[in-house]
């Protein structure tokens, strides 16, 4: 039972990450490959505040989300006006810079040794969330709330403007809107919720190190997004289900761990190629007419 709950906890975290990636990529047409950087920034900020201060979960979450969102401005201000491949390269550079800082700034991040002994979050600063049962309830609740928030955001005037920017940015600008400002806010919100996922991960695992927040992780998140489908809410949730449950199903085949790990990457790649060929909008995506 605890094994199943652990899988659901990790699934809830990836739902947050893929939903966050969907905002700039699926709505604002900004292909970002630095989601793992924001994930890691949120995790390290969380480790600091959880270890240094006895703050309630909601307070820590708000602090981490704001700080991670502010860090996103470093890349969005410099990159949000770039187009296509140039923006992708800018986010790639940010991802590599963040990983390098986390890995080499040993005085602050402990580098490759990681940060151990991260305490669990506390509700109201008193009730400590312990074990898989506590985190199952917490992450499921947070995931459900975030899904509702993103659903409302997508149908809000702000979400409709982001969708319009994806379809025709010049028309949006001609109507008096500032696409760069909307993209910046999309990047900020996306980073903030990636930071929230980092908080849940750090407090649940109680140990973090830079290898959890690499470029491979960013690509993994994008793979889930494109397999599920961009531009809606069902797509990211479906993609997260696929990429989280697939490796667990391989455990029942009886393959050695080393073989299963390599086979998982092959299956992810094949799945992405097949989906992009036969259903380029993803399992739950809609065809976007250009």
Image (spheres, rainbow, N blue to C red):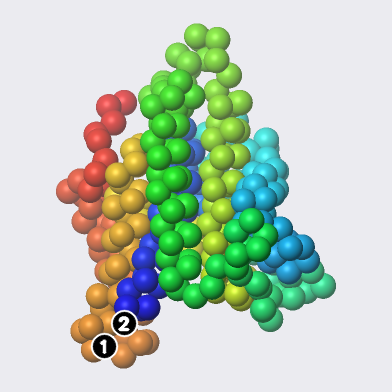
Look at the image and tell me in which quarter the C terminus lies.
top left
Disc 2 packing (10 Å; few <14; some 14–19; many ≥20): some
Q: Position of residue 22 (x, y in %)?
A: 42, 43
| Residue 86: x %, y % from top left | 55, 41
Residue at image point 23% right, 89% down: 254
- Residue for badge 2: 260
Q: Closer to the camera, 13 or 266? A: 13
Identity of the residue drawn at 65% across and 47% down: 62
Residue where numbered disc 1 is placed: 255
> Callout 1: 10 Å neighbours few (<14), some, many (20+)?
few
**Relative to 68, is 193 on the left or the right?**
left
On screen, 79 above or below 17? above
Q: Residue furthest top?
A: 175
* Quarter of the N terminus within the rendering: bottom left
Which one is nearer the viewer's eye here, 152 or 67? 152
Of the pair 8 and 288, the residue shown nearer to us: 8
- Whichever of labels 1 and 2 marks the residue nearer the N terminus, that label is 1
The answer to whether the residue labelled 1 contacts the one labelled 2, judged by CB atoms less than 8 Å apart, is yes
Classify 146 as above or below 249: above
Q: Is residue 82 visible?
A: no
**Location of residue 48 in the rendering, given as x and y in whole percent from the top left corner:** 73, 64
Q: Residue furthest left?
A: 278
User: Is the residue 29 above or below the residue 90 in the image?
Assistant: above
Q: Secondary structure at mark 1?
A: loop
Residue 257 pos. (x, y %): 35, 87
132 and 99: which one is in front? 132
Q: Is residue 28 left or right of residue 289?
A: right
Q: Is residue 59 left or right of residue 85?
A: right
Work out how far the residue at label 1 is from the one at label 2, CA to CA, in angstroms.
6 Å
Whether residue 69 can be seen here: yes
Residue drawn at x 49%, y 75% as measured from the top left: 131
Residue at image point 37% right, 78% down:
2
């Amino acid at each position: 039972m605890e094994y199943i709950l652990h899988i659901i906890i990790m699934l809830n975290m990836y739902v947050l990450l893929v939903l966050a990636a969907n905002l700039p990529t699926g709505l604002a047409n900004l292909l970002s490959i630095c989601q793992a950087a924001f994930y890691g920034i949120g995790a390290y900020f969380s480790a600091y505040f959880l270890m240094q201060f006895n703050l309630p979960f909601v307070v820590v979450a708000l602090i981490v989300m704001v700080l991670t969102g502010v860090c996103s401005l470093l890349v969005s201000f410099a990159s949000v006006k770039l187009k296509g491949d140039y923006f992708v390269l800018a986010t790639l550079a940010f991802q590599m810079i963040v990983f390098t800082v986390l890995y080499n700034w040993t005085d602050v991040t402990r580098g490759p040794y990681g940060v151990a002994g991260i305490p669990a979050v506390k509700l109201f600063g008193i009730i400590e969330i312990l074990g898989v049962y506590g985190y199952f309830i917490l992450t499921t609740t947070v995931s459900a709330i975030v899904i509702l928030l993103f659903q409302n955001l997508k149908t809000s005037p702000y979400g409709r403007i982001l969708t319009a920017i994806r379809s025709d940015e010049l028309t949006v600008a001609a109507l008096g809107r500032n696409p760069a400002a909307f993209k910046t806010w999309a990047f900020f919100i996306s980073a903030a919720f990636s930071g929230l996922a980092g908080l849940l991960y750090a407090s649940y695992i109680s140990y973090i190190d830079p290898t959890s927040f690499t470029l491979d992780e960013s690509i993994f998140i994008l793979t889930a997004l494109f397999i599920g489908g961009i531009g809606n809410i069902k797509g990211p949730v479906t993609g997260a289900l696929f990429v989280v449950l697939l490796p667990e199903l391989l455990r029942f085949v009886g393959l050695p761990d080393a073989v299963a790990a390599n086979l998982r990457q092959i299956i992810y790649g094949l799945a992405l190629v097949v989906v992009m060929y036969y259903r380029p909008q993803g399992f739950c995506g809609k065809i976007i007419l250009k």
